[in-house]
Image (tube, helix red, strand yellow):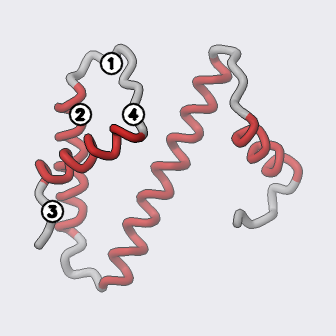
Amino acid sequence: MPIRPAQLAALMREVEREDPIDFADLPFPEDELRDLVANHLCEMAAAMENFSQEDRLMTLLAVSAKLVLENLVLHVQLLRRHGLPVGEHVDALLQRLRSDPDSDAD
């Protein structure tokens, strides 16, 4: 049974208890943003209905990886814009990428 948008939005809120999102001063209600994302992801999952289990998993992993990368990039840009340190883990990752751009990530 596929997950419904309301269920996904509820799961998102549950995950945010452990790792809250800083919505800052966005001019949109947080729940409306969650609902928008949940609807979009449920539509995306429905569009993969005819995919094999492996193709569905690979597609979802690719989408997740892209979003995590985008979040990292935006976070680092924001920190730099405000002249704040990026933190030792991010700094180590960036240093690793600078020193060996052809290496594969673990």
In the image, is residue 95 above or below residue 66? above
Nearer the observer: mark 3 or 4; the answer is 4
Q: Residue drawn 23% across and 38% down?
A: 34
Q: Amino acid at mark 3?
A: Ile
Residue 50 as seen in the image, left or right of residue 83: left
Question: Disc 2 versus disc 3: distance between alpha carbons?
Answer: 18 Å
Q: Residue drawn 81% across and 56% down?
A: 101
Residue 93 horizontal/vertical position (percent): 74, 47
In the image, is residue 27 above or below residue 77? above
Q: Earlier in the sequence, mark 1 or mark 3?
A: 3
Q: Earlier in the sequence, mark 2 or mark 3?
A: 3
Question: Disc 4 versus disc 1: distance between alpha carbons?
Answer: 15 Å
Q: What residue is pinned by disc 3?
A: 3
Answer yes or no: do the residues labelled 2 and 3 have beta carbons within 8 Å?
A: no
Question: Disc 4 versus disc 2: distance between alpha carbons?
Answer: 14 Å
Answer yes or no: do the residues labelled 2 and 1 have beta carbons within 8 Å?
A: yes
Question: Disc 1 versus disc 3: distance between alpha carbons?
Answer: 28 Å
Q: What residue is pinned by disc 2?
A: 33
Q: What residue is pinned by disc 4?
A: 20
In the image, is residue 62 above or below residue 79? below
Residue 100 as seen in the image, left or right of residue 48: right
Q: Amino acid at mark 2?
A: Leu
Tell me the quarter of the picture where residue 32 sits. top left
Within 10 angstroms of label 1, few (less than 14), some, or many (20 or more) residues?
Answer: few
Q: Residue drawn 54% across and 33% down?
A: 74
Within 10 angstroms of label 4, few (less than 14), some, or many (20 or more) residues?
Answer: few
Answer yes or no: do the residues labelled 3 and 4 have beta carbons within 8 Å?
A: no
Answer yes or no: do the residues labelled 1 and 3 have beta carbons within 8 Å?
A: no
Nearer the observer: mark 4 or 2; the answer is 4
Q: Residue furthest right?
A: 99
